[in-house]
Image (tube, helix red, strand yellow):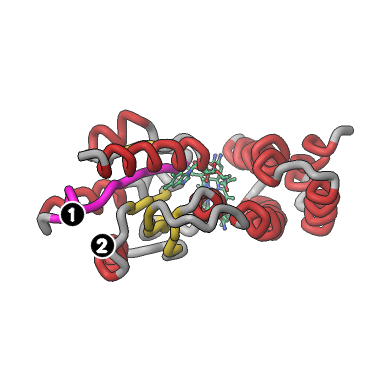
């Protein structure tokens, strides 16, 4: 079995020790951490989500697989974020209130950092007003939010509404992501960009920053 397949399997098997071993081996072999994540570990956790949805596994298994995923994400993110020291912009990133999913959000944080963005990571279950307070405090250019539940994606709309209400909408570039999020949702709530994955997020944010500078 090739390493990407083994990586995914270790997550489905809820085997954190194995996952960490494969991550270490992959990095030692010079495989880029983003490839290990997107071609190996992420398909594993997505499979776990499908099994959970189909009632093939239950919450305890979902939790154990996530723990394996969190372990490996920590290792990968440390390698991912070691990059560009040039600061091209500042971002505040977090998972919206009521939502504790943060594996994807943490990958986004690392990749933003690797691409020269200074990031303040607010973590998960972040109240809407917190995003704005922090963004004003550190004079951020970007506010990025992650939502993984159909019930919590409303938090992204709340942020847009609150920014408009406070007359701050034009001050920040907003980018939204997460499994249930779509381009259509982003347009509907008035976000500046939708990102399908972390790389897409980096590209869209860098291009929006560029457009701002040339205005
Ligand atoms: C892992 C997981 C958990 C873990 C989370 C651990 C953690 N620390 O994150 C635990 C076990 C805690 C959990 C709990 C629950 N979960 Co859960 N979980 C998942 C699972 C399997 C994987 C999520 C994940 O990590 N994916 C991998 C990452 C890399 O992908 P990602 O998050 O999508 O992020 C990428 C992109 O979306 C994008 N992106 C994401 N955010 C952002 C933000 C920005 C700014 C940008 C630019 C890009 C970006 O870039 C990322 C990297 O490329 C999903 C299934 C799925 N397919 O999503 C279910 C899933 C999201 N969970 C689900 C459910 C129902 C729950 C629970 C309600 C279960 C329960 N009965 O208690 C609770 C909710 C708890 C809460 N209040 O939040 C459902 C949601 C259904 C729905 N329609 O709302 C899903 C879809 C499973 C399913 N198919 O039923 N879960």
Q: Position of residue 158 (x, y in %)?
A: 23, 52
Q: Is residue 43 left or right of residue 211?
A: right
Q: Quadrant of residue 129?
A: bottom left
Residue lying at 69% horizontally and 38% vertically, measured from the top left: 35
Residue 173 is covered by the magenta coloring: yes
Name the residue carrying label 2.
132
Residue lying at 37% horizontally and 63% vertically, measured from the top left: 126
Against 164, residue 130 (above or below) is below
Between 83 and 200, the one lying in front of the other is 83
Q: Is residue 107 left or right of residue 172?
A: right
Between 183 and 35, the one lying in front of the other is 35
Residue lying at 37% horizontally and 59% vertically, measured from the top left: 92
| Residue at the limit of the structure toward the bottom, as seen here | 137
Cβ–Cβ under 8 Å for marks 1 and 2: yes
Residue 50 in view (yes/no): yes
Magenta-tinted stretch: 168-178
Name the residue carrying label 1.
163
Residue 70 in view (yes/no): no
| Residue at the limit of the structure toward the top, as seen here | 184
């Amino acid at each position: 079995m090739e390493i990407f397949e083994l990586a995914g399997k270790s997550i489905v098997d809820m085997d954190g020790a194995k996952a960490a071993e494969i991550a270490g081996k992959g990095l030692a072999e010079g495989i880029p951490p983003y490839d290990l994540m997107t071609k190996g570990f992420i398909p594993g956790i997505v499979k776990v989500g499908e099994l959970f949805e189909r009632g093939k596994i239950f919450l305890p298994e979902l939790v154990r697989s996530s723990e394996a995923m969190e372990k490996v994400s920590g290792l990968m993110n440390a390698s991912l974020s070691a990059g560009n020291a040039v600061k091209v912009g500042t971002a505040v990133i977090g998972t919206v209130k009521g939502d504790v999913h943060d594996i994807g959000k943490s990958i986004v944080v690392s990749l933003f950092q690797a691409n020269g963005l200074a990031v303040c990571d607010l973590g998960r279950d972040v109240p809407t007003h917190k995003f704005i307070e922090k963004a004003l405090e550190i004079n951020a250019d970007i506010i990025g939010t992650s939502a993984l539940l159909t019930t919590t994606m409303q938090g992204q709309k709340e942020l847009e509404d609150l920014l408009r209400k406070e007359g701050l909408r034009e001050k920040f570039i907003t980018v939204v992501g997460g499994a249930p999020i779509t381009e259509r949702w982003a347009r509907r709530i008035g976000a500046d960009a939708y990102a399908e994955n972390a790389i897409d997020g980096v590209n869209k944010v860098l291009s929006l920053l560029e457009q701002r500078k040339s205005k």
